[in-house]
Every structure is written in structure tokens, then in C-alpha cells.
């Protein structure tokens, strides 16, 4: 009988083996941090959750009103086409036209169960076990987890602290081998908040194009960028190279609705739909109705929230950078701060655990964002209100 030691250290007896690739993947980091929170002593100060990147506000009442009426329509409880309802995909194209001046048609759009499923669709459509994907450090932890589960090798482009984690085309080019299938970038970055400037993104797009590999761009937080994020979608044949992974979860405060999208060449989407059909079939219809409402009516609401997040960011940076703080801000943006902790020789995990238990602040350890990043912590301050920012920074200073 195979004996399996689980991540929790418990010995489990099972009459079957578990996929070795999957067993080598570390458990979801947010769950680990939430477990530390549960170990806090009774009567400790209220917890400040800077761990998960979720807007702290609700979707607007008019969106809720819209979907609450829709639930009584029997059609709402049915499947939709695998790629999503045509009218929702058309609404997405109109939104991309306004936001990116995009040359995009509904056959280049597939609605997905969150950006997470969009990433899986992209990954499985492009790679199989043994292939390589270039991943810029620090990277969003779910990405290497998915790669490892599939047996795809992440080839890491080193983190450059002075450049706030921006990618360097020459470094990336040197990592390309015959096995490379794509370059994976996230802008704005999770965990650093750094936005890749349009010119640099264009260079990286043409680099990928020259090498006949895909540029997979995760733009989950793009609605928090001021102005047009980049001009890649204005290129007539953007889809020859670009595969975009998008989430509307953060844009419309709908993270639990799992509102994602894949934008790519119609042929890639045709292939990806084989997978979507076996996995989730379609994005839930109720989510599509919420999304359509957001795409058609909420540009202004999204912009107001962008400004609020930017205000929070400025406030956070001001407070954090006041003299006397031994934690150092390495990079930051609308949702995130990427911080170097002062405890040399201690891992990010050790420091984050103590911050959770002793100071009541939940943050993620740097090492979950890639190898060699133990000296850092990620703070998601989009999660807390303005009034709590001072308190959060105060707790950091006291911990140091
Ligand atoms: C960079 C990045 N990509 C994808 C996701 C997942 O988005 P979704 O909730 O739409 O699956 C997240 C969520 O935090 C993220 O930070």
C-alpha cells in the first residue's frame, strides 16, 4: 500500500499513487498564512489582512440589482456556449476598444472561470510536459504552481531590484532555447505593483515574435493603471504573438464570481475550448450577466476606484517611508507593496509568521514569488481602508 506523507506531515494510507508533479507543488500560500492567523493569542489586536489582493469594496448596487432580477429567468440557470455569450464577448471587445484602442473581434475572446482558468487554457494550449516557459521574477505564485503541476519547466528571469522588477529584453532573450514556448509577464505586477511601460512591452512583444514564441500577458490589475495600459492591441495582427489573460474580478469587485477572459488568436481559442469543455464548460451565465453589465456601464465606476486605490497607494508610501522604518519599500503600485524585511538570515516565511502571530498583520513571504526572494514580503494594501493604513504601518515599525 503506498504511504503518502501529506504537506501537513500526516501519514495517509491510500491504495493509489498521487501525480508526482502535483505532489511537488507547494500548497496555496494564502491558506498557509490564514492558518498562522488562527494561532494568534486570545484578545490580540484585530487582524489587519494585507495578504489577499481583493478590493475591500462591493460591486455597485445597480449591478447587483441587474443580476438579482436575472436569477428568476429560467435561462439564467443554463449553460452558455463554451466560449461565452456572443453579446458579452462583443461587450468585452467594445470595452477593449475604449481602453486599449483594440482591434479585437468576439472570435478572439473566450470567457473563463477567472483569470486562473484563462491562464490554464493558455498554458495547456501552448505547452506540454518538458517544455519551458520564461517567467519573470518575482512572479505570481499560482503561475509556477500550474507549470509544475503540468511538468512544464519555469525558466526564471532574475529579479532586478533597482529596476523595480522590470524585465530586461536581453536577459530574457538569452534564456530562450528550442524548448521555450512563451514569455510570461504580469503587468501591473503581482507582487511588486510595477507597471511595464508600453515601449518596453512592445520590445518584449517583438522579441517573442522574432523567436516565434508567445507572449503571455497577465493583466489582472490593468484597470488600476491610469490611461491606456499599452498599444499592443492596436497592432493589426497582435494575436500572432500575444495571448492575454484578464480578470474582471478586481475591476468590478467580483472576485467570487470568477470573471476571467482569454484574448488570443481564434485558432488558439478553438484549441483552448477543447480544454474548457472538459474543465468548466463555460463561465457561469450569472457571471456573464454581471460582467456584461460592468463592461457596458461601469467605466466611470472603475475609474473612480482606480483613483481611490492610487490615493491609498500614495498614503501608504508616505507613511511607510517616514524615517525610522527598518522595513524598506523595494517597489509598489496600486494594489501592492514589495518590502525588504530587516531581519537578515531569517526567511520571509519566518518573518511573515511572526508578524501574523505577534503583530496581527497578514502578509505573504517573498519566497512564494520565486526562488531566492526570502528577504521580501508582499503587502496587498488594496484590501484595507485608508483609515487602517496608518495602523498597519505603525505595526510594522513596532515589529522592527
Ligand atoms: C497576477 C494574477 N493573475 C491571476 C489572478 C487570478 O485572478 P482570478 O481571481 O480572476 O482567477 C490573480 C489573483 O490574485 C493575480 O494576482
Image (cartoon, rainbow, N blue to C red):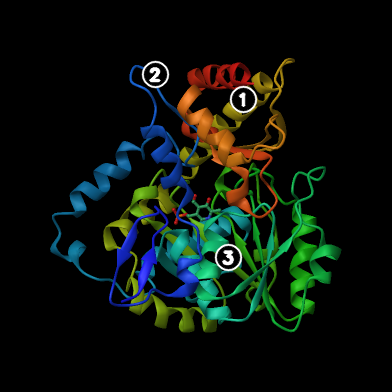
To which residue does mark 1 refer? 316
Q: Which of the marked residues, 3 or 1, is nearer the chain's N terminus? A: 3
Q: Which mark is residue 90?
A: none
Vertical placement of 121 versus 316: above or below? Answer: below
Instruction: Report the residue marked by disc 2.
Output: 44
Number of numbered markers: 3
Dot placed on the residue nearer the N-terminal end, 1 or 2: 2
User: Disc 2 to disc 3, how far (Cα)?
Assistant: 43 Å
Mark 3 is surrounded, within 10 Å at the Cα level, by few (under 14), some (14 to 19) or many (20 or more) other residues, namely: many
**Residue nearest the viewer, comparing 243 with 166:** 166
Residue 398's place in the image compared with 257, above or below, is above
Secondary structure of the residue carrying tag 1 is: helix
Q: Secondary structure at mark 2?
A: loop
What is the quadrant of residue 46 in the picture?
top left
On residue 244, the disc is 3
Location of the N terminus (image quadrant): bottom left
Amino acid at each position: 500500500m503506498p504511504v503518502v506523507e501529506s504537506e501537513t506531515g500526516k501519514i495517509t494510507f491510500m491504495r493509489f499513487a498521487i501525480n508526482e508533479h502535483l505532489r511537488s507543488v507547494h500548497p496555496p500560500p494564502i491558506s498557509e498564512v490564514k492558518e498562522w492567523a488562527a494561532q494568534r493569542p486570545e484578545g490580540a489586536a484585530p487582524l489587519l489582512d494585507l495578504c489577499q489582493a481583493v478590493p475591500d469594496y462591493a460591486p455597485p448596487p445597480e449591478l447587483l440589482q441587474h443580476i438579482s432580477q436575472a436569477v428568476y429567468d429560467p435561462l439564467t440557470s443554463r449553460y452558455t456556449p463554451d466560449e461565452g455569450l456572443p453579446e458579452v464577448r462583443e461587450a468585452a471587445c467594445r470595452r477593449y476598444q475604449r481602453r486599449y484602442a483594440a482591434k479585437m473581434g468576439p472570435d478572439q475572446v473566450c470567457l473563463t472561470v477567472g483569470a486562473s482558468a484563462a491562464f490554464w487554457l493558455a498554458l495547456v494550449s501552448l505547452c506540454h510536459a518538458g517544455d519551458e516557459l520564461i517567467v519573470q521574477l518575482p512572479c505570481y505564485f499560482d503561475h509556477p504552481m500550474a507549470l509544475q503541476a503540468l511538468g512544464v519547466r519555469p525558466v526564471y528571469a532574475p529579479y532586478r531590484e533597482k529596476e523595480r522588477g522590470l524585465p530586461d529584453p536581453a536577459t530574457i532573450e538569452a534564456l530562450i532555447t528550442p524548448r521555450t514556448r512563451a514569455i510570461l509577464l504580469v503587468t501591473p505586477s503581482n507582487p511588486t505593483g510595477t507597471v511595464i511601460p508600453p515601449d518596453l512591452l512592445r520590445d518584449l512583444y517583438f522579441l517573442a515574435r522574432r523567436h516565434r514564441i508567445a507572449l503571455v500577458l497577465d493583466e489582472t490589475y490593468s484597470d488600476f493603471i491610469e490611461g491606456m495600459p499599452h498599444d499592443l492591441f492596436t497592432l493589426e495582427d497582435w494575436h500572432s504573438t500575444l495571448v492575454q489573460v484578464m480578470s474582471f474580478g478586481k475591476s468590478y469587485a467580483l472576485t467570487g464570481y470568477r470573471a476571467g477572459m482569454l484574448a488570443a488568436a481564434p485558432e488558439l481559442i478553438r484549441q483552448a475550448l477543447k480544454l474548457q469543455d472538459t474543465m468548466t464548460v463555460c463561465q457561469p451565465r450569472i457571471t456573464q450577466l454581471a460582467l456584461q453589465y460592468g463592461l457596458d456601464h461601469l467605466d466611470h465606476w472603475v475609474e473612480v476606484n482606480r483613483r481611490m486605490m492610487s490615493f491609498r497607494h500614495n498614503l501608504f508610501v508616505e507613511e511607510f517611508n517616514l524615517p525610522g522604518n527598518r522595513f524598506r519599500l523595494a517597489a509598489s503600485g496600486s494594489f501592492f507593496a514589495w518590502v525588504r524585511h530587516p531581519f537578515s538570515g531569517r526567511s520571509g516565511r519566518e518573518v511573515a509568521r511572526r508578524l501574523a502571530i505577534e503583530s496581527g498583520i497578514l502578509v505573504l513571504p517573498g519566497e512564494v514569488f520565486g526562488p531566492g526572494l526570502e528577504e521580501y514580503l508582499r503587502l496587498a494594501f488594496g484590501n484595507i481602508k485608508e483609515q487602517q493604513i496608518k495602523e498597519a504601518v505603525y505595526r510594522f515599525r513596532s515589529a522592527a
